Image (spheres, grey):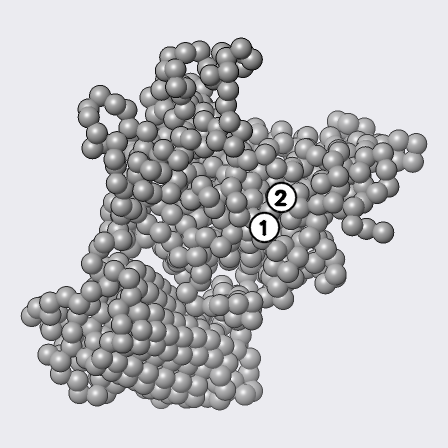
């Protein structure tokens, strides 16, 4: 069966006919509809055959404005660059130093986003911990609680406090280096978690106090607070229970970042995590992934605007941006727009082995191909990452995978430094919007930086 | 309570001082809290086998994330009383507002009066006994444990419930999605009897035989897929079930 980029079963009416022939203008009988292309037709057929909406992993796959639409200006007559490899360019980030007894001190401005044991194998979680620790940064738990494997292998571990409270244990809360209250995530602002039956093994079920094999749907709202005023009290409780030792983050999906960030500050967060719509997920409705939330490039400046207006930007409250970061260029641009750190999830999974071409024949058997695999919910991941199958999980060597992640984090950091030095900055957090120009009118309007070659920022006088 | 009771007056000292002392307490110690005046997060995060009596009403998250020992609140409580309780006991003589015992994993919560909306929401093993009534959406997505209601239950009781059990003596306004009445067998009467006995006076002498049992119909445990392709003639690949 041929496949399309989104993994849907494709094919042409002519069966084995070479699909490339569709590009031949003489082949009018293969002319594809823009409105009803092969993906759309396959999805309609799938929906008609099953009566269930499509659930998948990964993040938004649609084309959208991204940080690629921004460029750095670099040094010139009026800006001095720093020497590329030798001059110092700091990369450290501190979170929570104003309220917590033990602030989080990161050596690099890139963190590993929350991903659960359950959605990921124990080996994958261990690899993330090993890689992050080697690179001097934090990793994060997810729905279902903390495993001792990840605590043991993570030098800085952020404990997510989620609506479902699956596996929520006050002992683990006290063992964490920071607490992240999850209000939403970029892949699905307003949606709860999902873990399908094939991944609810006995261990996962026990951690979540659920029957094995059920299709588990996590709550989308917290059970014991309903708004920012309540959340402020909740954060007070979390601080009391942890004796004010560790920082508290609030994570929101990129929905209304200006207001959400302002309310998170009001609620007492030490850091706000804003996750753009490119952010990934282990399993969510496709319609949610592709149609809810706003892109990362649009979210960061709005969050920064709120922090600046409240006088806490780069001071009492730090901003961690997330959603689709791939390279040091993305990280540097996020920092230039005002984020204090960038968080990666999908890219980290790829670094440890997700979509590895070495398993191409198995991806083919699953009806897809390395580079397109998105069915994280299925539990059949040939790379042994998004699965609970013991045989598949055993394929991932956590030590080697951790080294790959550490290498990748090092590249992200060095690339960020390269761009910072090129703009004359002795610390990556000195990057600023003035270092950027936009390549499209849309990016200029969203990022609030001038269209390249002009001084025009759409929406500003 | 032994003579060596340490008293904290929240009109005089900060909540932080109280909670810090409770967190540092050794097994067997006893505490009294006076003038709580609706303060939030009073006596939260207790891990030692201690006794705490709070003389007055508390705000949000009273005895939150309680792990060991016993807390008695002589008054009322606001949202999230004993939320995520792990073990031990939390008792309150008066009423509790929203989300009492939310996500509790173990231990016993006894509410002498009424409990508001979402009592026992997402409970994961705690036993809750309410002497009076509970508000709407109680035991929403409740996973494990027992919720015993000596009075009435408001609308949508047990919506999307998993494996928790609900026992109601009075009227149920309506059941939520996938929650159904189930047979009250002898072992269930025994469970209720044990919990009523543990609740003591708060149970107001209720007869275990007067309770009805509710739980999950388990119809929402898995997505329903109508695999039309599979019903067709063999030999054709299913384009479907790729959830």
**Name of the residue lying farthest toward the right:** A77
Query: Which residue is denoted by mark 1 in the rendering?
Result: A254
Residue B58 position, x and y percent, is: 45, 82
| Residue drawn at x 34%, y 73% as measured from the top left | B136
SS type, badge 1: loop
> A84 or A114, which is in the foreground?
A114
Which of the chains bears the disc numbered 1?
A: A
Left or right of residue B200, residue A78 in this image: right
Q: Residue furthest left?
A: B186
Q: Quadrant of the N terminus of chain A?
A: top left
- Given residues B23 and A74, the one toward you in this image is A74
Foreground pick, B81 / A40: A40
**What percent of the width, then of the height, locates residue A411?**
62, 29
The answer for which chain carries disc 2 is A
Q: With respect to residue A259, does B211 lie above or below? A: below
Q: Which residue is mark 2?
A: A296
Mark 2, other Cα within 10 Å: few <14 / some 14–19 / many ≥20: many
Q: Is residue A49 above or below residue B56?
A: above
Distance Cα–Cα, label 2 vs label 1: 7 Å
- Disc 2 and disc 1 in contact, CB within 8 angstroms: yes
* Residue A102 left/right relative to A442: left
């Amino acid at each position: 069966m041929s496949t399309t980029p989104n993994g849907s079963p494709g094919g042409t009416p002519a069966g084995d006919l070479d699909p490339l022939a569709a590009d031949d203008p003489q082949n009018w009988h293969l002319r594809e509809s823009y409105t009803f292309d092969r993906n759309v037709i396959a999805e309609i057929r799938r929906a008609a055959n099953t009566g269930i909406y499509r659930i998948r992993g990964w993040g938004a796959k649609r084309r959208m404005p991204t940080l690629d639409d921004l460029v750095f200006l670099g040094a010139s007559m009026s800006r001095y660059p720093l020497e590329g490899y030798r001059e110092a360019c700091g990369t450290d980030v501190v979170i929570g130093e104003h309220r917590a007894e033990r602030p989080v001190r990161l050596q690099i401005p890139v963190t590993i986003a929350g991903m659960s044991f359950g959605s990921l194998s124990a080996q994958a979680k261990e690899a993330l911990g090993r890689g992050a620790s080697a690179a001097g940064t934090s990793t994060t738990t997810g729905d279902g609680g903390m495993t001792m494997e990840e605590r043991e292998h993570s030098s800085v571990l952020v404990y997510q406090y989620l609506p479902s409270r699956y596996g929520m244990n006050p002992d683990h809360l006290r063992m964490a280096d920071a607490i992240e209250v999850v209000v939403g995530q970029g892949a699905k602002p307003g949606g709860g978690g999902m873990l399908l039956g094939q991944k609810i093994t006995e261990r996962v079920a026990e951690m979540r106090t659920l029957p094995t094999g059920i299709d588990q749907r996590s709550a989308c709202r917290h059970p014991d607070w309903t708004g920012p005023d309540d959340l402020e009290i909740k954060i007070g409780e979390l601080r009391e229970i942890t004796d004010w030792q560790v920082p508290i983050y609030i994570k929101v999906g990129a929905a209304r970042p200006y207001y959400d960030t302002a309310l998170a500050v009001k609620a007492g967060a030490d850091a706000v995590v804003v996750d753009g719509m490119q952010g990934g997920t282990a399993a969510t409705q496709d319609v949610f992934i592709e149609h809810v939330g706003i892109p990362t490039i649009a979210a960061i400046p709005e969050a920064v605007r709120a922090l600046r207006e409240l006088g806490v930007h780069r001071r009492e409250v730090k901003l961690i941006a997330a959603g689709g970061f791939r390279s040091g260029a993305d990280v540097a641009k996020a920092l230039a727009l005002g984020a204090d750190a960038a968080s990666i999830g999908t890219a980290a999974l790829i670094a440890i082995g997700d979509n590895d071409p070495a398993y191409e024949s198995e991806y083919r058997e699953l009806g897809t191909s390395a580079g397109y695999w998105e069915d994280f919910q299925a539990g059949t991941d040939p790379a042994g990452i998004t699965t609970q199958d013991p045989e598949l999980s055993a394929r991932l060597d956590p030590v080697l995978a951790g080294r790959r992640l550490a290498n990748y984090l090092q590249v992200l950091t060095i690339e960020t430094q390269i761009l910072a030095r090129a703009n004359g900055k002795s610390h990556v957090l000195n990057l600023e919007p003035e270092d950027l120009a936009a390549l499209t009118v849309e990016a200029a309007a969203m990022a609030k930086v001038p269209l390249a070659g002009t001084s025009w920022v759409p929406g500003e006088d | 309570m032994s003579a060596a009771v340490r008293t904290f007056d929240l009109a005089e000292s900060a909540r932080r001082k109280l909670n810090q002392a409770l967190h540092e307490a050794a097994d067997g110690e006893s505490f009294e809290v006076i003038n709580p005046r609706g303060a939030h997060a009073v006596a939260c995060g207790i891990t030692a086998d201690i006794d705490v009596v709070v003389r007055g009403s508390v705000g949000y998250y009273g005895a939150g994330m309680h792990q060991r020992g016993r807390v008695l609140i002589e008054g009322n409580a606001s949202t999230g009383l004993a939320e995520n309780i792990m073990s031990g006991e939390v008792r309150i003589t008066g009423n509790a507002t929203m989300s009492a015992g939310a996500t509790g994993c173990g231990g016993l919560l006894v509410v002498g009066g009424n409990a508001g909306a979402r009592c026992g929401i997402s409970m994961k093993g705690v036993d809750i006994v309410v002497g009076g009534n509970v508000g709407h959406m109680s035991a929403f997505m409740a996973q494990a444990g027992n919720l015993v209601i000596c009075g009435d239950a408001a609308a949508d009781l047990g919506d999307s419930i998993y494996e928790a059990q609900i026992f109601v003596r009075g009227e149920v306004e309506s059941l939520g999605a996938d929650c159904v009445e189930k047979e009250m067998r002898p072992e269930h009467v025994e469970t209720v009897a044990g919990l009523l006995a543990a609740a003591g006076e708060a149970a107001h002498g209720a007869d275990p035989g007067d309770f009805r049992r509710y739980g999950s119909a388990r119809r929402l445990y898995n997505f329903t897929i109508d695999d039309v392709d599979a019903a067709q003639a063999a030999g054709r690949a299913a384009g479907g079930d790729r959830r």
